[in-house]
Image (spheres, helix red, strand yellow):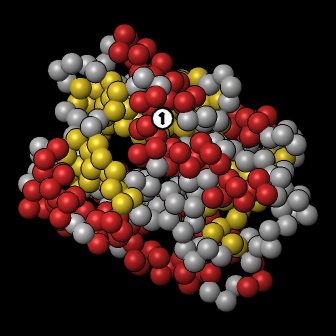
Amino acid sequence: MSNTVVALLFGGKSSEHEISIISAKAIAGHIDEKKYTLYPLYISRKGEWFEGKTAQAVLDLDMSGLLKKQSLAETGRQLQAMTENRQEDLFSFDFRQKGIDVAFPVLHGTYGEDGKIQGLLEMFDLPYTGCGVQASAMAMDKAVSKICASAARLNVAEYIAVSSRGYLTDPSPVHSMVRERFSVPFFVKPANLGSSVGISKIHDYSTLQKALETACRLDSKIIVEKAVNGREVEIAVLGNDLPIASPAGEIEPGRDFYDYTDKYISGTARLHVPARIDETLHASLKESAIRAYKALGCAGMARVDFFVENDSRRIVFNEINTIPGFTDISMYPMLMEHSGIGFSELIDKLLWFALEKSPS
């Protein structure tokens, strides 16, 4: 795979735009330059694709502490200024003419993990890292992924899926159903967003309406889900037809739950790699992760998230992330490194798996 040209796709239209840039910077910093030529492609919040100096300038942007020291709005203004009047760097989707061999999408959330970018790349017959269109779309939808997990005989927390339009048109039936089925605490979540964006933990029914309205503004479908009293653990899975699973990593939230602020701004969460569980439970979690991975038809990589109930030790499937974070604090590369696969080797394997599953 020497002299392979890799298009690194980052940014995007989702609420995880800045996290995508940080992940892309980490990949750019660890890719083996002797084997690969990096071709940065930055996608603005407006959906414009930039190559050349503009894409490189965003990739080179110092993001250290940016989310902590500046507001996200200020960060957005800075990025917007870097792309204004830069028509000369607009990308014309001539992947093959540019000599690009394979794409590495690091687009978290909507338009990145939901199958849309994967479908576009397939239209151009360009191999890409990670899951395909169908697996990406199913994994992105928390309700659909729970249906697949249940079909694979995995436990899921009690939940209901609600249409945002239906709720906003007539909220009373939803309020009644939630009060009837869920005792506090429980969660309200957008069905198709990542990084815990828009998630509320309900401790008092008086906050239910606001939480539902917040989630409805972010997604066309929302999830109301019973809170699990237990540890939050994650497994990194790597591979195509014969995937491998890492040991579990455990998240100890610094707040009420592991939300966006806890992940990227306050930095108060503690990560335990490996998780503080015994070998028997570790083995069960790894087997469950592989089962979920295969049930959704995943390829390349995914991070599978579970809860382990405190009293029963029952393993409960939470969700699956097909383009997990690659930042310095992200669990996926940490877990792979604990498995003996360093960051550079991980990139190498992901690119190899991309070319292996490509029909061309």
Q: Residue at x 61, y 34 (%)?
A: 297
Observer able to see residue 255: no
Q: Residue at x 70, y 55 (%)?
A: 119
Q: Is residue 82 above or below residue 170?
A: below
Question: Is residue 186 rendered to the left or right of residue 97?
Answer: left
Q: Position of residue 304 (x, y in %)?
A: 46, 34
Q: Secondary structure at mark 1?
A: helix
Observer able to see residue 285: yes
Quarter of the image where one finds residue 41: bottom right
The residue indicated by pointer 1 is: 148
Q: Position of residue 289 (x, y in %)?
A: 48, 26
Amino acid type, callout 1: Cys
Quarter of the image where one finds residue 58: bottom right
Q: Is residue 182 above or below residue 316?
A: below
Q: 319 and 29: which one is in front? A: 319
Classed neighbour count for the residue bearing mark 1: other residues with Cα under 10 Å, few (<14), some (14–19), many (≥20): some
